[in-house]
Image (cartoon, rainbow, N blue to C red):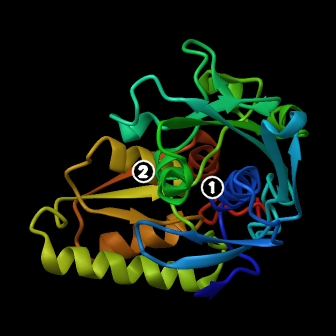
Amino acid sequence: LVDLKKGFSLPLWLAASAKSAVKVLLGYPFEDYELIKDPHSNQIFNVKVYSSAIINEGSKALSMTFADSGLTLDLTRNLEIWTIAEFEKDPDNGCNKKNLVNLIPGEGVGINSDTKQICISEFAQILLSANLLDLIPAGHVLNLKIIFPKGKFLAERTSNKAFGIVEGLSIIGTTADTHASASQEQILNAQEELDLALATSHKAQKKIIFVIGENGLDIAKRECVPFPIIKVGNWIGPLMVYAAAKKVQQVVLLGYHGKLIKLAGGIFHTHNHLA
């Protein structure tokens, strides 16, 4: 059991709020925390929840918490999260468990401008399913409405619209943990990952994929990139030098454009406190 005080991603907080709402809807007493399991690592995290209550004459439940990644410069730090849970009769009678959790984007939650579908990472979807499916009564589906009261305002400070995400914040995050990408520990971890890749993969000497942030990592995994993937955070320049010293022939950088623009301008450590 990992005690959650800081350092965990938005999907974990969302899952805690959702689980609390579902449990209250089922008649369980409110508790100010939820135990959330990460299906990737099998770790269990103790996540703070601030309130949950029955609404709409008992047909729905509302839960609220505040995201805290532990990162000083995180846009979603202290983001208020509301989830509204409601059960509905399942026309397929539980034949397809993948469709038992219906995610509804509410106020402040980003949607794809073309499809109108909620913008949520695969990890967040898996995390929600892993922690909610066993609570859904037989013969029902769970309608889960997600609301970020300040999401629309905060989205104006992002590049979401350039990527076709409108109306609010996308629900990103590919792991339960968040990492301070300017820390010395991260460059050492990346160097160790690169050394391991070079020792175990014949492809690594020819090409390495350096991913910048969770978005880059998510894309690399989704596209099944056939070369070793190393997450580099803000230590882009030093790790490119390290790769060159290790005789890597080609480095591909994958991630949002902001840090790549800094790199093109000769800024080799791209954290906001420097650039």
Q: Quadrant of the N terminus?
A: bottom right
**Residue at the image position 79 percent from the left and 53 percent from the top:** 76
Asked if the residue at tag 1 contacts the one at tag 2, i.e. Cβ–Cβ closer than 8 Å, the answer is: no
How far apart, in angstroms, are the residues tagged by discs 2 and 1? 25 Å
Residue 214 visible to an observer of this rendering:
yes
Q: In this view, does 216 lie to the left or right of 226?
A: right
* Closer to us: 216 or 46: 46
Q: Is 32 situated above or below 183?
A: above
* Closer to us: 219 or 79: 79
Q: Quadrant of the C terminus?
A: bottom right
- Mark 1 — residue? 11
Q: How crowded is mark 1: few (under 14 residues within 10 Å), some or many (20 or more)?
A: many
Which mark is first along the chain, 1 or 2?
1
Residue 101 visible to an observer of this rendering:
no
Q: Residue 38 carries which label?
A: none
* Closer to us: 270 or 28: 28
**Residue at the image position 82 percent from the left and 68 percent from the top:** 72
* Closer to us: 206 or 190: 190
Q: In this view, does 108 lie to the left or right of 123?
A: right
Callout 2: SS: strand
**Residue 90: x %, y % from top left:** 49, 29
- Mark 2 — residue? 253
Amino acid at dot 1: Pro
Image depth: mark 2 or mark 1 in front: 1
Q: In this view, does 227 lie to the left or right of 87?
A: left
**Residue 112: x %, y % from top left:** 60, 21
Callout 1: SS: helix
**Residue 143: x %, y % from top left:** 63, 34
Amino acid at dot 2: Leu
**Residue at the image position 62 percent from the left and 77 percent from the top:** 45
**Residue 255: x %, y % from top left:** 50, 46
| Residue 40 figure quarter | bottom left
